[in-house]
Image: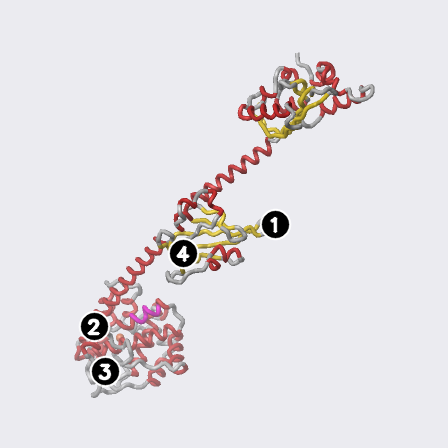
Amino acid sequence: MKTSSAALVAGESSEVTGLFRIAGDGRPVEALFRNTVEQAPVGIAFAKRDGSFRHCNRAFCSMLGFDAAELNNRSIANLTHAEDLESTTAGLERLWGGEVTHLDVEKRYVRKDGSALWVRVSTSLVHGGGAEAECSVEFLRDISARKEMAEALLQNQTLLAAVIAELPLALLACDVTGRVTHYNRAAVELFGIPAENTAAQARSAYPVTSRVYQLDGTTPVPPEDRPLACALRGEEVSDAEFIVVTPQGAVRTALSSARRLVGPAGQALGAVAVVQDITDRKHNEAEIKRYIAQLERAMYSTIDVIATISGMRDPYTHGHENRVAAISAAIAEEMGLEPSRIEGIRIAGYLHDLGKILVPAEILAKPTRLTPEEFNLVKLHPQASYEILKPLQFPWPLAEIARQHHERLDGSGYPQGLKDQQILLEAKILAVADTVEAMASHRPYRAGLGLEASLAEIEAGRGKLFEPLAVDACLRLFRQKGYQLPTPSTPGDQPNWARSIGVSSRRTGNESPRVVGDRG
Ligand SMILES: [Fe+2]
Ligand SMILES: [Fe+2]
């Protein structure tokens, strides 16, 4: 039969009720204390010296899942979790032996269903007036929720610690004094921290004994300028690159970012730095740069070979191309084009009349007016330039630019009669530079017409024949910015081959003025 704990308090345990009879006739006080114990929100258990329970209140029964009668046959030791039994027994011995006046511990009891319950237990002895204590009394609070929270927190911390430890990035954290307090495995490897310093205990000491330099590898970075120190002063460090030389002599390139650590109340906690070993990346980048430079050299060599062959046959055209290259690049720069596009225009200028290699030399150098048939032959050269350049791989559309350099906005140009939107901007710029150079310079068939006449020509054709932006830039250069027509002696005007074999690109004598059907 199930006995209620109230009945137990009222009748079964006369020893307990005796304890409560502590004043006068005692009865109201006894009842008051009985009810207090029974209705207390904390578990209360009275136990004999051998640990067997004399009385447990309702909350105690409820916490452990037993009813009061079931607990009569059990003891503190019976219900204590195996892992806490030894310390519990020892504590009770000290209490009963008078070594301590009370116990205050956190321990696990085992519920009726076998599950563990974390409780905080305060235990003291109860004296009934005699020298010997009559029993012990335990006050229990269920602390399972706090323990679960603490356990979860611990798991989170363990996980976080594992993540930091295994992070492929080196991590260093320091306190407000700048002393490094935490670092991970990647930091050990990157900074070459000696193994004897990597034990957890040693991590309170500053472990980074590696030398730090600027990227030049020779300028030392003093400790106060290193990322953690900067971050500690509130300076944000992002992607700063350093050379690190470890105590073992390994040289590494490190990419570092650091931030100051601030607590929830805004208080300074220290700083943290994340450092990435980019030695391999830097090495690969350098390799790629070297490879690109090699390719560029090969490309420019190709260009030079083509120009050399063409220039050996027709040094005059070669000089013209070099000057057109310089003028068109200057116009492109004045127009604000980006450097790589300007370079493409310069190279296109350098090669634009390459197709003249197919025009008989006597026609190109003919000192008198060309016949219509001869001029038709000359007009084939942009397409010929295109055909020669087309198979070659360049970062710019050189073949197309060369083919279009005699096209005009109104469609009156050749070879395709393209109109404004169909013509590449590079070709439009080349057309302006080509016209100015061709008119201003001496040609085999006429003397130079002078710069002003050339500028007047492109000004007159502005918007009809020539791109207005290119014309405006060209006029600004010559009229306002003091730009001078390049001369054959201008560096770069003649390539190496021409200087080395003494070929002159200037023709003199027997020249007659000619504008219409110019051969540029
Ligand atoms: Fe041309
Ligand atoms: Fe030309």
Dot placed on the residue nearer the N-terminal end, 4 or 2 = 4
Circles 3 and 4 in contact, beta carbons < 8 Å: no
Location of residue 43 (image quadrant): top right
Task: Tell me which amino acid carries mark 3.
Answer: Arg
Within-10-Å neighbours for mark 2: few <14, some 14–19, many 20+: some
Cα gap from disc 4 to disc 2, whole angstroms: 52 Å
The residue that label 2 is drawn on is: 308
Describe the colour scheme in one phrase. Answer: secondary structure
Q: Which mark is residue 506?
A: 3
Dot placed on the residue nearer the N-terminal end, 3 or 1 = 1
Cα gap from disc 3 to disc 2, whole angstroms: 16 Å
Task: Tell me which amino acid carries mark 1.
Answer: Ala
Magenta-drawn segment: 341-347
Residue at 25% across / 77% down in the picture? 494
Q: Is residue 173 above or below residue 337?
A: above
Dot placed on the residue nearer the N-terminal end, 3 or 2 = 2
Task: Tell me which amino acid carries mark 2.
Answer: Thr
Q: Which mark is residue 211?
A: 4
Residue at 33% across / 84% down in the picture? 451
